[in-house]
Amino acid sequence: MRGGWVCVAVFFLFTCRTLAFDWTLIKHEGRDYVPVEDVAKFYSFTQADYSNDIINLEGPTLRMQGGVNSRELYLNGLKFILSFPIIKVDNKVLMSRMDLSKLVEPVLRPAKIPTAPVHTVVLDAGHGGYDQGASSLLGNEKAFTLDVVERARDLLLKAGFNVRLTRSADVFIPLEDRAAFANRQSKAVFVSVHFNAGAREEAGGVETYSLAPRGVPSTNNTNLSFADFQPSVGNIRDAENIALATAMHTALITKLGVNDRGIKRARFIVLRDSTIPSVLIEGGFLTNAQDRVRIATPVYRQFLAQAILRGVLSYNRAVQRNEASDQMMVRRSQITEEPAPDAGASVWDPLRPNVYTLPEDTRK
């Protein structure tokens, strides 16, 4: 189901007349869903195929793929992990309203969510001091993350950004302090760099996390808990978070050419407590034979730094877009170009087009 191309700059598909779109809402097991057929119509897909419970939507610049009972969604080959599986009820294929408003809509129509251009990038090297993070015979996470961050800092400074580091030495910084430091920066984004460890050695590749919206489980959890309904200050940036994650993940996959483990959701403290757009990237598995050799190679870490720069540039270029040429996040062509995603400061629900906050009934 993966496509061979990934990019993040797409033309705005819609005109004002789409605000009157007549959505069908279906309640199933206490949760709101919309037919994927409605999604196809609203986003102007010209071809739609639902045979064998596989979703394949095609348009001039966009392809969406997924499957019934799956949480994996591919937009022009880029992998997203939905909060809830796509389901089939009474022969209708349905997507959760939460995934529509909190993932699909911000990615496909970011021009609906205005935000300021980024001037400052806060880089967070994971772990440090007595906390070495994941480790291998070739090195440990805390050293590799600091090296990537220092390389990214140099590139971002040359590109004209202000750069702040949560740590610039082998010291331990509490997670809450990292988020608090980021929150003191204005017109900024927060990028936390980590490397993974897995119980199975075959697990490998890159994944990117943004904060889980209120009312959905973290990607690695299958059931909702009480904590999932608690408000987090970081949720004020839900739309910007997923836009930044899309920009960053696209840059990583395009630059590194590694296994795409997807854009995921979590409630990591540095994401949960951050009031600026934030992402956490996992640049590979130190428990995977191929990944750990890559990670220990300076060239690979330089590529990671370059991808961080590319992701920030893409995000920033989109939010400074010309209103006469609105852009989306996912485009089919120009894979070799710098990605150019869009982003926004608040949530726009296509089922309530004049409301720029998350309706209460979508939190269930």
Image: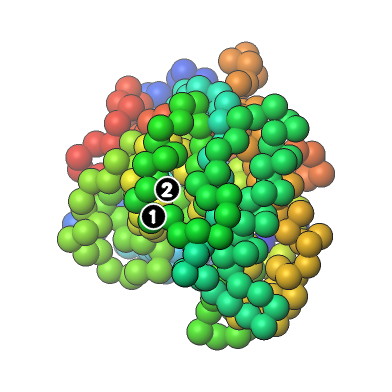
Q: What residue is rendered at 25% in x and 64% in y?
A: 224
Is residue 277 visible to us here?
A: yes
Q: Which mark is residue 175?
A: 1
Q: Nearer the viewer, residue 28 or 340?
A: 340
The amino acid type, in three-letter code, at marker 2 is Arg
- SS class, disc 2: helix
**Label 1 neighbourhood size at 10 Å, few (<14), some (14-19), many (20+)?**
some
Q: Position of residue 218 (x, y in %)?
A: 36, 61
Is there CB contact under 8 Å for labels 1 and 2? yes
Name the residue carrying label 2: 178
Q: What residue is rendered at 47% in x and 69% in y?
A: 131
The amino acid type, in three-letter code, at marker 1 is Leu
Q: Position of residue 136 (x, y in %)?
A: 63, 80
Q: How many labels, in total?
A: 2
Q: What residue is rendered at 51% in x and 84% in y?
A: 199
Instruction: Kindly indicate the quadrant of the structure image that contains residue 121.
Output: top right
Q: What residue is rendered at 40% in x and 24% in y?
A: 19
Is residue 331 visible to us here?
A: no
| Lateral position of residue 269 relative to residue 145, left or right | left
State how far apart marks 1 and 2 are (Cα). 5 Å
Q: Position of residue 91 (x, y in %)?
A: 38, 62
Q: Nearer the viewer, residue 256 or 158?
A: 158
| Lateral position of residue 332 relative to residue 27, left or right | right
Q: Position of residue 9 (x, y in %)?
A: 67, 35
| Lateral position of residue 57 relative to residue 270, left or right | right
- SS class, disc 1: helix
Q: Which mark is residue 337?
A: none
Above or below: residue 300 compared with residue 137: above
